[in-house]
Amino acid sequence: MQGSVAPSDSQAMVPGVSPAIYGEADFRRVATLIHAETGIVLSERKKMLAYSRLAPLVRRSGLTSFGAFLDTLEGDPRTMTEVVAALTTNHTYFHREPHHFDHFESTVRPELLARANAGADVRIWSAGCSTGEEIWTLMMVLLGRDRAARLKLARGKLIALASDISVNALAGARAAEYPASALEALPEPLRRAWCIPAGSTGEPRLAIAPEVQALVRFRELNLMGEWPMNRPFDVIFCRNVMIYFDIPTKERLIERFARQLAPGGYLYIGHSERVSGPATTLLEPVGPTIYRRKGHA
């Protein structure tokens, strides 16, 4: 998910790229670059993490120093994308922070179902969707446990957007196939209704049912850049994306999310994240790390 950096540093050296040619100036350039591109703040303790993540790219380039490699990035957007992907991580899992899904199921879902079944638009966004566990959990909770009754909803005007800065993470999300053990945290009735066996050898695997997959649109998106969406959302999930942002970046992003919500819409953020700054005039807390856009729905 965008904005998450691995919590522990790797000290592994990469063959072919000497740590002696990775100096303080190189790390400062990397830190400046990743902050400008993604809003992530790389502290000094992440110096060796940055080395271990980027050294394979330096080696592949055929260059022998980080400085020379970094010099090439301005004119090479494809490699720049790989650098960003290497310096972000995609740790997530199904049914993470279950109180969010409990709130969504009991408070938000009934209204969304009524609107969707009446032919009105329903719009949901998983921002920083990583490898898809969040958006698939959300869709299954929305569709509910009665498969036959909810197929009508799946054919309605429900639009779910799942975005991430990492093309590799998005590929995993689109594939929608996971080890069966990864879905054990889901309520069993949802797993039975909306997951199907996948693969024939090795560890048992499950795939998200095609009816659920058809609801979701995936998009590569840097949250620090322009957003192409011109219509508001009823629900935005952006969880554990902002934990490595500095405060001004967090406040700007949360304000943008607030303005992208329809009046009465809901924003769900990570357990260690808080709303502050200008967004406090637009959002009201309605539960632990759950906020509602002020105004009438």
Image: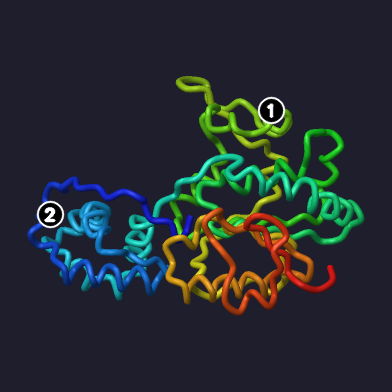
- Answer with the quarter of the image where residue 157 lies: bottom right
The residue depicted at 73 percent of the width and 69 percent of the height is 293
For the residue marked with disc 1, what is the amino acid?
Glu
**Which of the two discs, 2 and 1, labels the residue nearer the N terminus?**
2
In the rendered image, residue 231, in percent from the top left (x then y), is placed at 72, 71
Where is residue 190 drawn, in percent x and y?
71, 33
- Which label belongs to residue 254? none
Measured as percent of width and height from the top left, residue 107 is found at 80, 51
Dot 1 alpha-carbon crowd within 10 angstroms: few under 14, some 14 to 19, many 20 or more? few
| Residue under numbered circle 2 | 17
Q: In this view, does 260 lie above or below 188?
A: below
**Image quadrant of residue 142?**
top right
Circle 1 residue: 188
Q: Height in image: 119 above or below 277?
A: above
Number of other residues with Cα within 10 Å of mark 2, as a class: few under 14, some 14 to 19, many 20 or more: many
Q: Amino acid under label 2?
A: Val
